[in-house]
């Protein structure tokens, strides 16, 4: 589509440029003896009411129409772009003033201003287009200003400032590159609008009759519509084709840029978290259908096979689990491979690993909250004696899990703030899932919520109940989410880096809370973390993961004190506690031809 | 003091304008004084919102100085602007926390590293030679020059950021949480790199971190910030192992150790301290 519209525009521009060569007659040469004639060998599109050659006028008209539209865009950019850059980058008084001016310009009735300009300065199409360029410049101003504001506080702009780069170079090099693409898109649209406005004015008879433009021809054709309808056809076609091509070009450029963005994001997202926002603990049941769709392929057989005998007593048992993401080339990229472990009632299992180790993906597969695109490529997961992922199934049994999630499995997320909806009070977000899942009355649910908030150590439950998420601290928000996770007396809690986003003193308190609740409620906990200190504080057993595989598993003391696998040894040797200060932690690195760091890009 | 003082900050106050009409300004730093000698590392530890990042930014000229003095080699730089600041960039550099936003995603690594050199008037050829040297110093492959930041992992990006900071051979680098976005093993390698560079070049660091272990490991002296003030300051080992101020003590006891039994006793100690504090508070 983009190529087609570029082609159309290129042809039109070429025709306009070659007008002096291609046009058989001057635009105003009138053969009085041959008016309103139809197409013949001399006048290939016929002549108009004054005997002028339509084809020649169309070509010269293209010249004037296109260049005046371009002038309009240039004027608008010349005003809007620099003022937008300055206002966005520096802010302050200039920003206030220019913003105010832009608002005034935008509130002026454009057509009336253009009529006034015509009355004052005459019918020149150039003057009209300059005026229109000024009128439309706020659209560039606003666009540039908001784009610049978005990057102004980026760290790389700060780094450039510290490097001594002058403001002008920063704007030119780091900031301008951000607005380039939107400006191009905007310009395509503005040119189209300029042609439309200009033609509209001229159609009303406000153009300069001594110059050939498409609008003037349109006006002329309209006057002779009953005698020679084709006079109207050609300029309309030219206008329609040009504006259409410009609009489509703008769309195509935008789509191309967005696609680029998307493919990049998809690449990054494969190791990221699935969308689980807006769900505190039990809420995930209420919304359970939305985040994960059951894939159409290979539905689970109606009868789920019984689990292997002798393993029913495990609360959760993951066997030889493999999770993969289909790639564009048809292959499947495995992020979890042959992972097996179990969690029993009343114990805390730590899953440790660095970013990209697949630890979060594993936890999410137990919760059934993997992204839509994920595939279970091998293995099975069972919960309390029945399969949630039967062997030889390629997806999580959502029906089965929806009944468990929030009732028997609670979830504590990493980012407390992004897991609370800022538009609703904390109380509402606690009460709603409880009413839904436990079938409590409003009154009973509120009482229970208040009790839960007190249980998780919130000093003034009533106040927190009525508060919005932004009114509480990160530590408080995490306590609220823990309250949500335990609201339905679960058997299993899955905690995904529950303290990573918190300050260390708050982390200690939240760890105390999790330990205390775990002992009191006798739940099993699957704790995902990268921090061996947190492991030592909470866990009974540990699973160490690297690149999607389990490299070592065992009781916490054994793993932390005498790790067997080299990777675990390396991780523990990277711990700073007890190391000689100001000494090297590893052997010197020799630069190699390729990546030294083994870690996976986030 | 035997080593020569490089940076001296006296009674620094930084106010940020309040949000909304006639709102009271927010005091991010309140009477902060620190000193960094040549070739020395001052670790600055504190929790989120304590003002530690603001102090780094004020030294870099990125935060407004309301009151107090910042002196670099005896010269007041607190209100330096424009030209003065540009010449300072030869001496004071920065490594930011987030290696994902501190590098312009649309610039090649070679251009990112060349920028500070070109600004200081070096020729393209000189800059080129220096960049090759820098890449070697931070152990990055030579073919990195013509690649974009997104081709690199977090640890490698942080190496690029460190190379950029080193480009002009500065005397002081402000490191704002440079390892907190990194994995444990990557963190260890990047910390090693910081130590190697200091040994090789004699650069001084202001090393800002929320992690007491990191600060203990890399610093000669440590300052502890709490709510915009420095509550304790001194040699690294005493401050980070036997702190005197109750807040530093709380910070130390809150950071978990990687052994269940030692962690259990640290936990008990922390709870005892909390109870003791609660009783003194009620008295």
Image (cartoon, coloured by chain):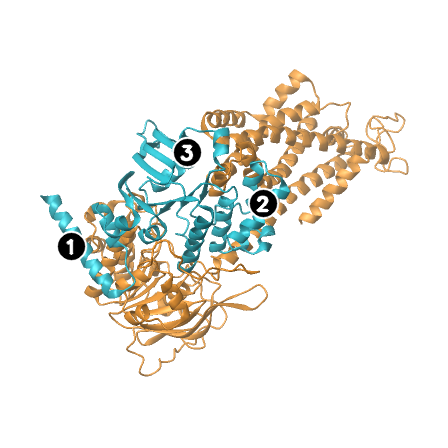
Chain colours: A orange, B cyan
- In front: mark 2 or mark 3? 3
Mark 1–mark 3 contact, CB under 8 Å? no
Q: Which label sits on residue B111?
A: 2
Mark 1–mark 2 contact, CB under 8 Å? no
Q: Which label sits on residue A38?
A: none
Is tag 2's residue or tag 3's residue first in the polypeptide sequence? 3
Furthest residue toward left = B283
Is tag 1's residue or tag 2's residue first in the polypeptide sequence? 2
* Residue A197 percent location from the top left of the image: 64, 30
How far is mark 1 from mark 2, CA to CA?
55 Å
* Residue named by callout 1: B272
Q: Is residue A431 visible?
A: no
How far is mark 2 from mark 3, CA to CA?
31 Å
Furthest residue toward bottom = A309
Marks 1 and 3 belong to one chain: yes
Determine crowd level at label 1: few under 14, some 14-19, many 20+ residues with C-alpha closer than 10 A.
few
Q: Nearer the viewer, residue A352 or A525?
A: A352
Marks 2 and 3 belong to one chain: yes
Q: Chain of mark 3?
A: B
């Amino acid at each position: 589509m983009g190529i087609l519209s570029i082609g159309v525009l290129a042809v039109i521009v070429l025709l306009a440029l070659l007008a002096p060569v291609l046009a058989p007659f001057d635009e105003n040469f009138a053969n009085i003896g041959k008016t309103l004639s139809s197409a013949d060998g001399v006048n290939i599109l016929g002549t108009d009411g004054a005997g002028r050659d339509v084809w020649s006028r169309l070509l010269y008209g293209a010249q004037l129409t296109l260049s005046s539209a371009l002038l309009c865009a240039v004027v608008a950019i010349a005003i809007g772009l620099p003022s937008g850059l300055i206002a966005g980058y520096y802010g302050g008084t200039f920003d206030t003033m220019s913003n105010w001016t832009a608002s005034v310009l935008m509130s002026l009735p454009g057509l009336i201003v253009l009529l006034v300009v015509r009355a004052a300065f005459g019918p020149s199409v150039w003057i009209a287009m300059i005026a229109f360029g000024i009128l439309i410049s706020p659209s560039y101003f606003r666009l540039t200003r908001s784009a610049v504001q978005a990057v102004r506080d980026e760290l790389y702009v700060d780094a450039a400032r510290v490097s001594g780069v002058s403001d002008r170079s920063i704007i030119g090099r780091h900031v301008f590159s951000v607005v380039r693409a939107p400006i191009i898109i905007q310009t395509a649209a503005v040119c189209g609008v300029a042609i439309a406005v200009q033609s509209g004015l001229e159609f009303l008879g406000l153009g300069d009759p001594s110059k050939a433009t498409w609008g003037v021809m349109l006006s002329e054709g309209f006057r002779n519509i009953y005698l020679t309808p084709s006079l109207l056809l050609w300029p309309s076609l030219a206008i329609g084709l040009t504006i259409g091509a410009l609009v489509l070009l703008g769309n195509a450029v935008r789509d191309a840029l967005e696609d680029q963005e998307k493919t990049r994001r998809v690449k990054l997202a494969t190791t990221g978290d699935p969308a689980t926002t807006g769900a505190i603990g039990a809420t995930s049941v209420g919304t359970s259908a939305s985040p994960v769709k059951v894939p159409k392929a290979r539905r689970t057989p109606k009868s789920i096979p019984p689990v292997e005998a002798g393993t029913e007593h495990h609360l959760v048992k993951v066997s030889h689990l493999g999770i993969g993401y289909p790639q564009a080339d048809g292959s499947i990229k495995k992020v979890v491979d042959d992972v097996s472990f179990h969690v029993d009632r009343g114990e805390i299992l730590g899953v440790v690993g660095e970013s990209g180790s697949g630890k979060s993906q594993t936890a999410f597969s137990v919760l059934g909250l993997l992204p839509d695109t994920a595939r279970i490529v091998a293995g099975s997961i069972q919960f309390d004696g029945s399969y949630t992922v039967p062997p030889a199934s390629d997806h999580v049994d959502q029906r089965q899990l929806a009944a468990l999630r929030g009732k028997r499995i609670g979830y504590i997320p990493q980012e407390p703030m992004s897991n609370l909806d800022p538009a609703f009070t904390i109380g509402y977000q606690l009460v709603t899932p409880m009413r839904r899942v436990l079938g409590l009355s409003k009154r009973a649910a509120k009482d229970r919520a208040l009790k839960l908030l007190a249980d998780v150590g919130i000093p003034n439950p009533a106040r927190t109940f009525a508060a919005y998420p932004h009114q509480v601290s990160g530590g408080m928000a995490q306590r609220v989410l823990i309250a949500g996770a335990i609201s339905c007396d679960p058997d299993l809690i899955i905690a995904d880096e529950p303290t990573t986003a918190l300050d260390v003193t708050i982390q200690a308190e939240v760890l105390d809370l999790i330990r205390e609740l775990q002992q009191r409620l006798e739940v099993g906990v699957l704790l995902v973390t990268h921090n061996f200190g947190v492991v030592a504080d909470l866990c009974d057993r540990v699973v160490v993961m690297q690149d999607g595989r389990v490299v070592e598993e065992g009781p916490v003391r054994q793993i932390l004190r005498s790790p067997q696998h080299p990777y675990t040894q390396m991780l523990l040797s990277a711990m700073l506690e007890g190391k000689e200060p100001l000494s090297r932690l590893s052997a010197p690195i020799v630069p190699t031809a390729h990546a030294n760091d083994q870690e996976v890009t986030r | 003091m035997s080593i020569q003082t490089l940076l001296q900050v006296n009674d620094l106050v930084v106010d940020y304008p309040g949000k909304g009409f006639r709102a009271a300004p927010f005091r991010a730093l309140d009477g902060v004084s620190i000193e960094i000698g040549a070739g020395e590392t001052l670790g600055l530890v504190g929790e989120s919102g304590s003002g530690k990042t603001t102090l780094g930014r004020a030294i870099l000229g990125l935060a407004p100085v309301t009151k107090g003095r910042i002196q670099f080699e005896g010269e007041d730089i607190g209100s330096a602007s424009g030209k003065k600041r540009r010449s300072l960039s030869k001496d004071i550099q920065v490594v930011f926390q987030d290696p994902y936003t501190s590098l312009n995603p649309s610039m090649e690594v070679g251009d990112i590293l060349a920028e500070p050199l070109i600004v200081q008037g070096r020729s393209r050829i000189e800059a080129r030679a220096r960049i090759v040297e820098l890449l070697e110093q931070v152990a990055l492959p030579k073919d990195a020059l013509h690649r974009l930041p997104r081709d690199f992992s977090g640890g490698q990006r942080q190496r690029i950021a460190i190379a950029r900071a080193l480009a002009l051979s500065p005397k002081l680098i402000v490191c704002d949480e440079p390892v907190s976005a990194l994995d444990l093993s990557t963190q260890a390698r990047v910390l090693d790199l910081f130590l190697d560079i200091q040994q090789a070049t004699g650069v001084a660091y202001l090393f800002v971190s929320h992690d007491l272990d990191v600060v203990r490991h890399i610093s000669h002296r440590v300052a502890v910030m709490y709510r915009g003030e420095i509550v304790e300051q001194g040699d690294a080992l005493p401050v980070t192992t036997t702190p005197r101020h109750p807040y530093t003590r709380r910070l130390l006891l809150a950071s978990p150790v990687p052994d269940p039994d030692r962690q259990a006793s640290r936990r008990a100690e922390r709870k005892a301290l909390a109870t003791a504090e609660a009783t003194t508070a009620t008295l």
